[in-house]
Image: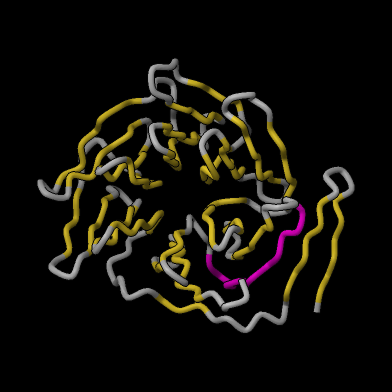
Amino acid sequence: MYLFKTFSKFSFILILLFSCTNEWEKAYFDICDKPEDILFNDEQVIITNSGINQGNVTVVSSVDTVVMQNALIHNPKGLALFKNDILGVSDSFIFRCNVEDQELQIIDTISGSSGLNDIAVYNEIIAISDLVGNKVYIKMPSAPLITLDINKPNGLLFLKEGELIIGTFNKSNSDLIFYNLFDRKEHRISVPFSVDGLDLVNGQLLVGSYNGALYKLELRNKRDLVLLSKKRGYNFCDLTVNENKVYVPSNNQNEILVYTFSESI
């Protein structure tokens, strides 16, 4: 059954699919203490846990499980691969996960930031959201730091070089912002939920909401947002696609959920 709701200001159509039969499963990682993000790197699974008093980054492999902490990194959030490094953000820091030495190394500080939340990388370009400070910072090689004033930026994703998607976190009135780094133009889509995780699958944008729902957006027209599934009682913090599954941390339930895509997506 389909329910259509039109937002005239943005010519936006929200399609809810209540007949979805895909079910959520719990991931096998039984090490979650308020998980925030998850990243797959070869045979390793990297998870940030904000914890209660002191957060950590956990690396799971077929050999062992390594838990890394740093006294200055209290609230690790988003993760991204940069060249051969695993980078993350916390508070005002950018840190590197040194798995070999089993430590978190602070490699940069964003002056004036107060709540770094997500990080996205494309080639040499790094984008970082500051949810508390209402900023998005963009670091490009041999260029000054770019600062965007955006209300409660949260999830980040690069579609291609120079095109950044920013999801905002404003409960019932948020945006998906498609921002071009070179001509500084943007296209906004209004959505009635707080945007958190973003990723791509089969040329479509996956969008996770903080109220525990998973959507997909057709990127060709950037109009039709489809509800794939909803997990009641869970909040979604981020999401990562690996093969035909999407992994979604839920820090209010201390779990990482797994959703398997149907062949039709």
Q: Is residue 228 magenta?
A: yes
Task: Left or right? Give the position of 127 relative to 61.
Answer: right
What is the magenta range? 223-234
Q: Residue at x 17, y 64 (%)?
A: 65
In the rendered view, would you say 25 is above or below 170?
Answer: below
Task: Left or right? Give the position of 81 relative to 228.
Answer: left
Quadrant into which the N terminus falls: bottom right
Q: Which residue in the rendered view is the most extreme toward the left?
A: 101
In the rendered view, would you say 110 is above or below 237?
Answer: above
Task: Left or right? Give the position of 17 relative to 46.
Answer: right
How far from the left and from the top, in percent, is residue 19? 71, 82
| Closest to the observer, 173 or 261 | 261
Q: Residue at x 44, y 66 (%)?
A: 247
Quadrant of res 72: top left
How far from the left and from the top, in percent, is residue 50? 35, 51
Q: Residue at x 26, y 52 (%)?
A: 57
How far from the left and from the top, in percent, is residue 85? 26, 42
Q: Residue at x 57, y 28 (%)?
A: 181
Quadrant into which the C terminus falls: bottom right
| Closest to the observer, 253 or 102 | 102
